[in-house]
């Protein structure tokens, strides 16, 4: 059964607020409504269940370079009037900023996407619980050494609208779901961990068998792991690990990081920053991306931005504010953490353009290397300004083209700059993950491995 699109109702509310703007004011109203479900299963029983609804409005008022903001978690008309009044009052607390201002229509057309699935909207709660239980059952059946730490189902439904005195008038909705399972593999006194997941627009797209299989494999592969000898070595990053590194790199490829002196890529537009094999795009218009969207948090059309083309840095992603500070045009990358947050610049859906070969084919061509399956403490182990990183890792040694002995309790270290330049191959095994970056296998030469 088709569900009516109610986001137009939110746009009406936003437009009413904007219509109350006083002379000399820029006013923005961001209105949203959401619903989410979280199920956690342990030993066949529901351990945690939350179904939460939320709605609210955030208002920004800009006048004479000062910005005042306020929000509330209701759409009651009398409360909205108070929010607008409070945003105006808060103007007095802000310092003038010459770059302050709201987004303006830039003529970029919205890319039509199927971001809403009625089948997910109509899925009964009992079915969602059954899926989490089934995932746990399939995982336990995979190997007698495996225990399930937790099996989870999550989904989210969102509707939002943005209106501004500068002419923005947009509304839309999206939903999606995913399953995840955490595993523990025991062998004597040793325990190793693993995980698996499945992503989809509706529950029929969730591949439970693959999620269970990966959760079992990731945990059992590392049983019997030892500490390797220290040396410089070729590494193959598992797609999930690549996605984690991309999250770090993406955080330095936005205009706000650049103007605040927090980006290792500052002043490097037009330079070769990676091996020519690497092309990195931010593409929220690809409906396969878990974080796909048609509009950004400021109401501009989301778009495909090529950040690194054949190894050469092309651009940074920009919000309206960061674009003004850098003297460039916005890229449709205003991120917003709900109705209570203000926009900031950031990547929406990072993807490396994939190569041609599978991970198995890549490994077959490596005489001496290591397949990195896990990293620990990556965010705390990376300096986004210098690019230096050192992170704990676990994985499998590669000898003469074959994956062999498991290893753990070692670190890999380099700089992000060197790592990008030392890329030797990009895999063709693109994986869509429940995060804002996708993954591929990535071969990197000359990485320092510190172990025994």
Image: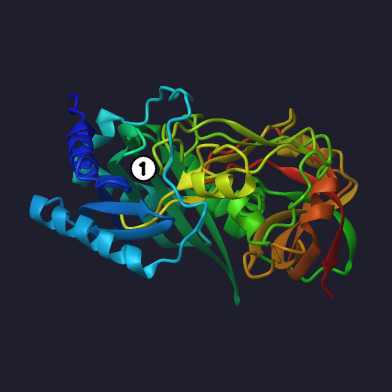
The residue drawn where x is 44% and y is 47% is 101
Figure coloring? rainbow
The residue drawn where x is 31% and y is 65% is 90
Q: Is residue 221 visible?
A: no
Q: Is residue 404 visible?
A: yes
Question: Mark 1 highlights which residue?
Answer: 177
Residue 35 position within the rendered picture, expressed as x and y whole percent measured from the top left: 24, 48
Residue 341 position within the rendered picture, expressed as x and y whole percent measured from the top left: 37, 57
Mark 1 Cα within 10 Å, few/some/many (few <14, many 20+)? many
Q: Name the residue nearer the viewer: 304 or 130.
A: 304
The secondary structure type at the circle numbered 1 is: strand
Residue 13 position within the rendered picture, expressed as x and y whole percent measured from the top left: 18, 41
> Left or right: 193 with respect to 7?
right
The residue drawn where x is 72% and y is 63% is 385
> Left or right: 420 with respect to 128?
right
Residue 308 position within the rendered picture, expressed as x and y whole percent measured from the top left: 72, 38
> Left or right: 293 with respect to 240?
left
Q: Indicate whether 378 appears above or below 141.
A: below
Q: Quadrant of the C terminus?
A: bottom right
Q: Indicate whether 391 appears above or below 203.
A: below
Q: Quadrant of the N terminus?
A: top left
Q: Name the residue nearer the viewer: 75 or 225.
A: 75
Q: Name the residue nearer the viewer: 170 or 306.
A: 170
């Amino acid at each position: 059964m088709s569900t009516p699109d109610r986001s137009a109702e939110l746009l009406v509310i936003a437009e009413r607020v904007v219509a109350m703007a006083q002379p000399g004011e820029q006013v923005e109203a961001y209105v949203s409504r959401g619903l989410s479900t979280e199920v956690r299963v342990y030993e066949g029983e529901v351990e945690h269940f939350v179904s939460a609804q939320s709605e609210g409005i955030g208002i920004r008022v800009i006048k004479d370079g000062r910005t005042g903001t306020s929000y509330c978690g209701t759409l009651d008309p009398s409360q909205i009037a108070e929010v607008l009044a409070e945003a105006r009052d808060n103007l007095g607390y802000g310092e003038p900023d010459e770059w302050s201002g709201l987004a303006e229509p830039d003529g970029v057309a919205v890319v039509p996407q199927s971001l809403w699935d009625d089948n997910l909207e109509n899925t009964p709660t009992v079915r969602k619980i059954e899926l989490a239980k089934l995932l746990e059952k399939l995982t336990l059946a995979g190997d007698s050494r495996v225990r399930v730490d937790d099996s989870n189902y999550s989904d989210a439904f969102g509707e939002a609208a943005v209106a501004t005195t500068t002419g923005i008038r947009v509304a839309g909705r999206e939903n999606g779901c995913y399953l995840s399972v955490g595993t523990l593999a025991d062998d004597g006194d040793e325990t190793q961990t693993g995980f698996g997941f499945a992503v989809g627009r509706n529950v029929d797209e969730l591949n439970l068998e693959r999620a269970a299989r990966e959760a079992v494999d990731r945990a059992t592969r590392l049983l019997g792991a030892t500490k390797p000898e220290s040396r410089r070595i070729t590494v193959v990053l598992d797609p999930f690990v690549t996605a984690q590194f991309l999250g770090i790199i993406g955080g330095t490829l936005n205009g706000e990081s650049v103007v605040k002196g927090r980006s290792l890529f500052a002043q490097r537009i037009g330079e070769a920053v990676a091996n020519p094999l690497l092309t990195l795009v931010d593409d929220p218009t690809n409906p396969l991306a878990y974080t796909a969207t048609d509009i950004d948090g400021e109401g501009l059309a989301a778009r495909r931005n090529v950040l690194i083309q054949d190894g050469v840095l092309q651009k940074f992603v920009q919000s309206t504010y960061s674009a003004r500070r850098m003297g460039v045009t916005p890229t449709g990358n205003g991120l917003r953490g709900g109705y209570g947050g203000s926009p900031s610049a950031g990547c929406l859906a990072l993807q490396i353009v994939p190569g041609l070969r599978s991970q198995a084919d890549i490994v077959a061509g490596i005489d001496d290397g290591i397949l990195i399956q896990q990293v620990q403490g990556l965010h705390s182990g990376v300096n986004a300004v210098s690019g230096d990183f050192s992170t704990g890792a676990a994985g499998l040694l590669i000898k003469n083209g074959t994956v062999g002995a498991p290893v753990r309790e070692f670190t890999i270290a380099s700089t992000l700059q060197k790592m990008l330049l030392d890329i030797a191959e990009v895999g063709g095994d693109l994986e869509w993950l429940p995060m804002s970056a996708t993954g591929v296998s990535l071969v990197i030469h000359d990485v320092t491995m510190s172990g025994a």
